Image: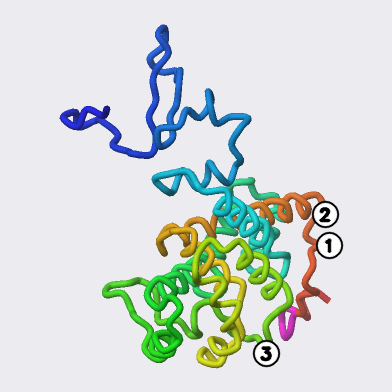
Amino acid sequence: MADNSNPHTIRTSIWREEAEADNPFATRVAYCRGYDVYGEMLGQARWVEMLYLLFMNEAPTPAQAELLESLALALANPGPRDPSVHAAMCGGVCGSTAASSLMAALAVGAGQLAGGREVYNAATGWAACGTDLAAWRHWFAEPAIEPGSVWSTPEHPPGFDAHGVSTATPVKQTLACLAGYGVGPRLPWLLKNQPDLEAAAGRPLALSGVAAAAFVDLGFSPEQSEMLHLLLRLPGAAAHALEQRPMGYKKFPFGVVELEGDAAEQTA
């Protein structure tokens, strides 16, 4: 039990450690939400079960673990056309450190266009509107703005494709897969009512919207959903940054930069 009278005590309900008898700075046993991580979980639990346990007060059910694992796979690599991955690739091709490339991906992938904040906004909508289409129509018409927020009003309905014409095939495939686990009401309802919800939004569904519904069905808050979305997209950013590093900037994709005017004459 933590000594709350000591001002230097770290207060956390997530993690508890017991020290080795001969070294107070070395951990003998570590508990996550009461589970012995190295004595019981190691070799028995899956990574997504540990991930869920870190954010929630109890371990996931088998169906929840399966849903989270499939969602993690769907989010693992947004692809080189995604701005967050492109930012990491820019870091890699310039020889930046590993941390710099990942921080670039986090910074660019944190916003309201398929980023972490869009998932936060969409998860807020799912938490507020649930499976009520009328509530969604009202939410689209009058999006709630948090007082004092540093974020501007979203330019498109959160969770929907800002520039899309029809729902992308991977979005439909991911929704069909995740809804099949039957963990919560939102994903199955979204699968059934997708056309009506898209008509209300005036935009096709995006992967961020599916992810937000999945996070809320798993019991995560909008804040937790945003954090997890940022985390789960990093593997692809890391892999693409490492791939580009030895190639050099001359082989970097996305076309050639063309100069005009005096700058072009100086390089001629």
Q: Is residue 104 above or below residue 200?
A: above
Q: Is residue 21 above or below residue 136?
A: above
Which segment did they paint magenta? 259-263
Q: Is residue 55 left or right of residue 62?
A: left
User: Which image quarter is the N terminus in?
Assistant: top left
Callout 3: few (<14), some (14-19), or many (20+) C-alpha neighbours within 10 Å? few
198 or 86, which lies in front? Answer: 198
Disc 3 from disc 1: Cα separation? 32 Å
Counting residues from the start of the chain, the first of labels 3 and 1 encountered is: 3
Residue plotted at (47% across, 57% down): 227
Q: For residue 165, which numbered disc appears in the image? A: 3
Give the residue type that dot 3 points to. Answer: Val
Q: Is-magenta flag for residue 50?
A: no
Disc 2 from disc 3: Cα separation? 35 Å
Q: Is residue 2 above or below residue 78?
A: above
Q: For residue 251, which numbered disc appears in the image? A: 1
Q: Could one spot residue 101 in this view of the protein?
A: no
Check whether the beta carbons of the residues at disc 1 and disc 2 lie within 8 A of each other. Answer: yes
Q: For residue 247, which numbered disc appears in the image? A: 2
Q: Is-magenta flag for residue 260?
A: yes
Q: Nearer the viewer, mark 2 or mark 3?
A: 3
Query: Where residue 139 sits: x, y (%)?
Result: 39, 85
Callout 1: few (<14), some (14-19), or many (20+) C-alpha neighbours within 10 Å? few
207 or 83, which lies in front? Answer: 207
Label 2 residue SS: loop
Q: For residue 111, which numbered disc appears in the image? A: none
User: Which image quarter is the C terminus in?
Assistant: bottom right
Main secondary-structure element of the magenta-colored stretch: loop
Place residue 160 in its image quadrant.
bottom right
Residue plotted at (52% across, 48% down): 61
Q: Residue furthest top?
A: 22
Residue plotted at (45% across, 32% down): 35
